Image: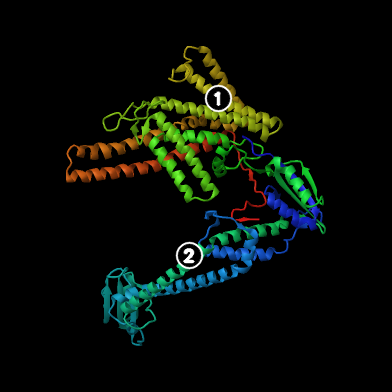
Amino acid sequence: MLRPEQMRRLLIAAPKGEIDTIIRELYRHHVYHIEDFVAESESPEALSIGHPLSGASDAASALIKVRAIENACGIDPDSVEIRAKLPASKVREMIRTDLPAIQKEAEDLIGSRSRLEARQKEHEQRARELEPFAAVPLDLELYRGYTRFAVFTGHITHDVAIDVPHEKYFSDKVPGNMIVVVAQTEHREQVERTLLDAGFQAIPVPEETGAPADLMKAHAEEARRIGNEIVEVNAKIAGIRDRHTDFLVACDELLTADVERAEAPLRFATTEETFITEGWVPGDRADRIRQALESATNGRIYIEELEIDDDTKVPVEYENPSFASPTQVLMDIYARPRYSELDPTLMVAIVFPIFFGLILGDVGYGAVLLFLSLGLRKFLKGDEGRMLLRVLGYASISSIVFGILYSEFFGFALPWNAVLFSRHLNIGGEVHGHGPQVAELMIISIWIGVLHITLGRILGMINARKFHHGKHATKAVIANAGWLGTMWGILILIWSFYAIPMMPDLTGFPVAIAVGVVLLVAGVLGIAQENPLEIVELPTIISHVLSYARLVAVGLSSVAIAMVINFIAIGMMIEPQLEAITPLGVIFIIVGIFVFLVGHVLNTALGLLGGGLHSIRLHYVEFFTKFYKGGGKKYNPFGMKSKFTEE
């Protein structure tokens, strides 16, 4: 907790004859993060990048075929439910016997669909080309074949008068209008100039014969008929998906493992007789993997634990309690922690739901979001999606708890008084329940901001000792302490001059002024000793603290919207009609129910966005900037956890 998992760096060297055994053992344990070998100019000439194992090309080729079928059938392995694992031996046998037939069937159907789609597009295009001419009662062969006459066909903004002898047909029944002009060849330039002045855009005459309207209808009918054939082909492709999904995802997994194992030597350094690889293993599993490798090779292996000389190269794996693990997805969105710095995931896992509940503290909205987070698990199969839903679930529970404390249910007051502070506003001429306590809530939010930022600066001092060395570390620690001293100096000075509810009253203690001034001046000097330009950032002390007022402001806006919805739907539309039911009153009641439901659905969505975005913003902007750098490299162990196959 609060630190990434400790890593150990291993160097493995062995004869090339053991490379297959070692790769399989590393893959099976799924804990070894390989450091890719990069040939450098100063490296001994004998070291070079290894070559893939035998069978790599065949496995890659088969994997491409499987994924092509999956793509054509719309199969996403990440979204497939695990029903039963298939034995790997059975899958390999089916790859040899069944996969070619499935591939041929799928390729034939896909090819047929492509040809049909091309023909359908062709007929649709020809129908579109004929559409302007359908407005003109002339067969297409009458537009061409003249030597003494020029024919103009095209769109035009409006009808136009032509001063030379001609025949003309104009229609405004098609998009862009349609004009056809036939004139003697010697008047071509004059007619053309007149048409262009009116915005004429020529369109070619389709190379067909007959009435355009009949031809257009025939092409449209043919396109529809082909569309029906495409639907039938798609149904057959869906049949392949239904029959072979389990087999195809198992093939994908098995062949992916084969390819990764076969291509692993490309990440190793090799000589003519041996290979060398470096990588990272979690500290508590290093001894186990060492013993497994020595046992698998009968001791024909050399393993050495290397010193960690640059912690920026160490891959980072989170180490958090299970309830905090889903929050890691929020950390990865910002940046994974570096190996040597504090991991704030646990703090975010605790504080984020609290902030969310402070903003959207309502039993009704919290319950809706909780059911939503549970219901969406059927549709979101990926790890990140599941983690986000669990974060939403925790936030929803917090929202329900704060709703009980605030005594709120879809903007209504619950039968008890607010345990914390009431947020009920005077909307509709009456105060529901207990009246708003805005000032108290604002002061609470300021306290939260002060304490959250103070924690961030303390963590900043701890991280500074990790990131820097010698006098640079001392300067960084003093600078963080300076920011803290400045903030608390300002607070003490304010408390010395003004008595603020729910805050210390220091107005009767003149010494407090001196303490505040000393903290303020010392803090500014502490900031400046590291970098004088940081002084221009002093106003952020106040702006960052005040930023926490959004915990109350956004929450109050949600309460206000809920109460307005209730007042319009119930107070103005439903309740007056219940006094004397009439046919018109029933309509008003139905409309009122509609307004109530739609209004609260939209307010729930706003609450989700407002509660989520503002809570995470306070962490990313106001909290993390005090101590957190991030940028750690993700721990990516060699191998995979089998989902669809078993040995």
**Residue 447 left/right relative to 631:** left
Q: Is residue 363 above or below residue 252?
A: above
Instruction: Point out residue 257 in the picture as x, y percentages from the top left corner.
Output: 65, 57
Instruction: Say which element carries label 2.
Output: helix
**Residue pictured at 42% horizontal, 34% vertical:** 400
Instruction: Tell me the amino acid under the disc marked 2.
Output: Ala
Instruction: Point out residue 69 in the picture as x, y percentages from the top left corner.
Output: 55, 65
Instruction: Say which element carries label 1.
Output: helix
Instruction: Point out residue 559 in the picture as x, y percentages from the top left corner.
Output: 36, 34
Residue labelled with disc 1: 486
- Depth check, front residue: 78 or 476: 78
Res 206 quadrant in image: bottom left
Residue labelled with disc 2: 238
Instruction: Tell me the amino acid under the disc marked 1.
Output: Thr
First in sequence: mark 2 vs mark 1: 2
**Residue 274 left/right relative to 590:** right
The answer to whether residue 578 is visible is: yes
Q: Is residue 454 above or below residue 320?
A: above
**Colour setting:** rainbow
**Residue 518 left/right relative to 416:** right
**Residue pictured at 48% horizontal, 40% vertical:** 393
